[in-house]
Amino acid sequence: MSEYFKDINHIKFEGPESENPLSFKFYNEDQVVLGKTMKEHFRFATCYWHTFTWPGLDPFGGPTLERPWMQVGDPLKMAEIKLDAAFDFFNKIKTPFFCFHDRDIAPEGNTYKETKKNLDHIVELMEKKMEETKMKLLWGTANAFSHKRYMSGASTNPDPEVFAFVATQVKNCMDITKRLGGENYVLWGGREGYETILNTNMKLEMDNLSRFLELVVDYKHKIGFKGLILLEPKPHEPTKHQYDFDAASCLALIRKAGLEKEVKLNIEVNHATLSGHNFEHEIAYAIANNALGSIDINRGDTMLGWDTDQFPNNPADLILAFYHIFSNGGLKNGGFNFDAKIRRQSIDPEDLFYAHIGAMDVCAKTLIATEKLINEGILSKHIDERYSNWYKDLGNFIHDKSTNLEKISQLVVENKINPKPKSGQQELLENILNKYL
Ligand SMILES: [Mn+2]
């Protein structure tokens, strides 16, 4: 047990009537919903970066979070204290998984060799902690955006030495992820984009990104890593034009590399909203293209134009995405990772617990509503009916490969086809959805 969280006990399900703020009101890990327990459906993960590494900075202010492992001292010793606190937290909050970037868990050294030595040291301790706590790794990833060497991109950098450096970093992080039994490996581009076309060879940068994906998939097979490789869409931030803007742009990159069977997507709520879509759009788009891998669950703020990464707190923001996820069989290798951070004024150890408890409860509440929505089948009935003519004569005729534009035109003239507009009934459906919330 860590010193930092010593006053907090294991969080238990106590039901909606409980007055204990350090208990689950709706998340009951053993409760069966849609044929599986909540624990099996969500495969919740706590993230290492926001929860243990982020010091409370904003663009105008310095650190507000004075964690013991953020004090001045030997960086490796600090990483050990952080590891202790992180595993104590995982164990008490009961997310069965966690996720990390290589730089979250161990400090960067002066040389690559030194960095690797630091990482190996922490990974060895982490392996023991995982064994003790039965905690599992949902995915690992490499931080290829914080260091200044990546200011002009990682695999899309104009300098091939940076490409080689990030390739080495990712190779090492894939090795670690495999060693720790990680279930997936995530590539978040970070700075895979550009600021101005004035100094950018876009074709070469995109070719290099494609080459990078190829190398990563090739290495995955070489080491026998069984998990999925996931690409995480994010628009803007940090670069003005990101090549991995949204699910559609990521799929274009994946298809360019011919890797649609190998690389899937890690969809994040706040990245979806920043791209001008909503969460359900990105989820439905990924599902329609057989590309949904995993989820970073959080929320943005409609009044702030940046990635605020707040914890989810409203079932209405989640239910349509959940409806699509769970009516399509749910996540398999993936999980719900809390890529979310507390506000910088939430400086107490308890605040980290309140944030995760609230988010897990909101997800549980939404899942229960989603079960009803799926089982009562009202939405699916409306959609089936709206598209039903596609499964009849004309729809079959259009899809028949021997049909061509001439034959279609002929049919329209001969049968005097004259389509009549039909209501989309959006307001009716919004009212129906409201009943479940
Ligand atoms: Mn994310």
Image (cartoon, rainbow, N blue to C red):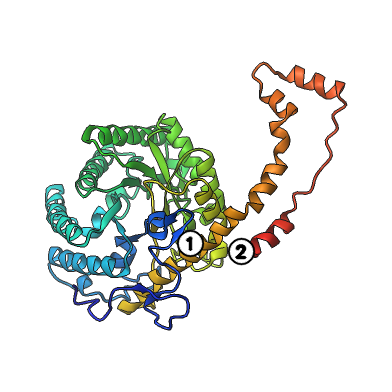
| Image: 286 above or below 95 | above
Q: Report the front residue among 152 and 103.
A: 103
> Where residue 295 sits: x, y (%)?
43, 53
Q: Secondary structure at mark 2?
A: loop
Label 1 amino acid?
Answer: Trp
Residue 317, image quadrant: bottom right
Binning the other alpha carbons within 10 Å of mark 2 as few (below 14), some (14 to 19) or many (20 upward) gives some
- Asked whether the viewer can see residue 342, the reply is no
Q: Report the front residue among 138 and 374.
A: 374
Q: Quadrant of the N terminus?
A: bottom left
Query: Label 2, on which residue?
Result: 436
Q: Quadrant of the C terminus?
A: bottom right
Please report the residue visible at 23 percent of the width from the left and 32 percent of the height from the top. Answer: 222
Label 2 amino acid?
Answer: Tyr
Please report the residue visible at 39 percent of the width from the left and 78 percent of the height from the top. Answer: 345
Please report the residue visible at 33 percent of the width from the left and 76 percent of the height from the top. Answer: 64
Taking the image as shown, residue 314 lies to the left or right of residue 417, namely left
Taking the image as shown, residue 77 lies to the left or right of residue 245, namely left
Q: Marks 2 and 1, Cα distance to the nearest angstrom?
A: 30 Å
